[in-house]
């Protein structure tokens, strides 16, 4: 694209936008019969084939892009890359490496301006949708399978744990199957909720912020109601540690005088 140079700041990284996807198929006229949905055409309007040997897509979602409502298709790949495709042509509009391993789950804030990603690289991230710029990183010591933003607080909830293939020989305590609570801006973990004895794969928060539920490999969906202490909780600004600098002692002496 003449209006977007091929990453001059990354000369050592090949541009994979041209090799990841094949040209999309032309639009297919669709017939939707509302009186008898079974008679509607089932063929897709368009398809965006991925080149053989390229990483598979693991998550997709419509996003607002370039001033167009749902004008882009956000795609997460198993190599940690995220791309935004033009919903009409399939052209790659933007692409950035967000994670080092597969992206397991994506979610958004209410306005769909912030993207939250959960990955097998033991990290979750907050990303600016318009630029695919990483804003915050939430680090853990186990693969992250789910992440969701609290609708009324500046908190995110992460879920995951040890891989399912190893769960049969691992206790819940060692597998670390807790739901983990982070302050979304200052990236501070302030709480964990136990209960599952398998990796958490899905999280959802009640729109009014009063409860959340989690689904895991153990076959259970657990509903948790937040107690009043959490509802009334206010987030304090962490104190910044100020390192001593040369001349501080002289300045203190002058202030005493």
Image: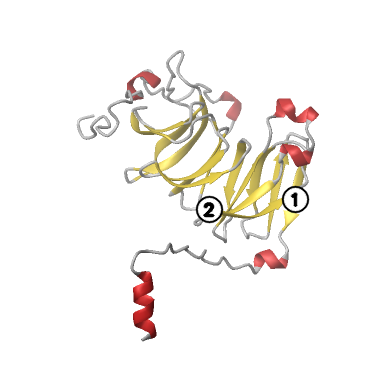
Residue 34 spot, x, y in % from top left: 55, 34
Using residue 21 as the reference point, say whether residue 179 is left or right of it: right
Q: Determine whether the residue tagged by mark 2 lies in a helix, strand or loop.
A: loop
Q: How is the image coloured?
A: secondary structure
Q: Quadrant of residue 233?
A: bottom right
Residue under pointer 1:
223
Q: Are marks 1 and 2 in contact (CB under 8 Å)?
A: no
Residue under pointer 2:
187
User: Which mark, by number, is residue 238?
Assistant: none
Residue shown at the point (46%, 32%) measured from the top left: 75
Looking at the image, residue 180 lies above or below residue 232: above
Asked whether the viewer can see residue 58, the reply is yes
Crowding at dot 1, Cα within 10 Å, few <14 / some 14-19 / many 20+, comes out as few
Asked whether the viewer can see residue 70, the reply is no
Residue 1 spot, x, y in % from top left: 24, 29
Tally of numbered tags = 2
Looking at the image, residue 195 lies above or below residue 30: below
Residue shown at the point (71%, 60%) measured from the top left: 226
């Amino acid at each position: 694209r003449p209006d977007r140079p091929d990453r001059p700041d990354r000369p050592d990284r090949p541009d994979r936008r041209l090799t990841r996807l094949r040209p999309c198929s032309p639009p297919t006229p669709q017939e939707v019969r509302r009186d008898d949905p079974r008679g509607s055409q089932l063929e897709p309007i368009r398809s965006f084939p991925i080149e053989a040997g390229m990483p598979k897509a693991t998550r997709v979602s419509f996003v607002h892009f370039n001033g167009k409502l749902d004008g882009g298709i956000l795609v997460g790949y198993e190599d940690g890359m995220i791309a935004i495709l033009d919903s009409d042509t399939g052209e790659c509009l933007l692409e950035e490496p967000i994670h080092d391993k597969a992206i397991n789950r994506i979610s958004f804030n209410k306005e769909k301006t912030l993207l939250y990603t959960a990955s097998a690289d033991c990290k979750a991230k907050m990303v600016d949708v318009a630029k695919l710029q990483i804003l915050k990183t939430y680090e853990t010591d186990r693969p992250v399978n789910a992440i969701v933003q609290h609708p009324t607080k500046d908190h995110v909830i992460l879920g995951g744990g040890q891989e399912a293939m190893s769960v049969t020989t691992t206790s819940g305590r060692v597998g670390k199957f807790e739901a983990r609570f982070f302050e979304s801006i200052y990236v501070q973990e302030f709480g964990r909720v136990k209960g599952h004895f398998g990796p958490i794969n899905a999280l959802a928060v009640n729109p009014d912020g009063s409860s959340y539920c989690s689904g895991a490999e153990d076959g259970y969906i657990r509903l948790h109601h937040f107690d009043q202490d959490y509802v009334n909780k206010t987030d304090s600004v962490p104190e910044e540690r100020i390192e001593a600098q040369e001349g501080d002692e002289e300045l203190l002496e002058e202030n005493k005088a």
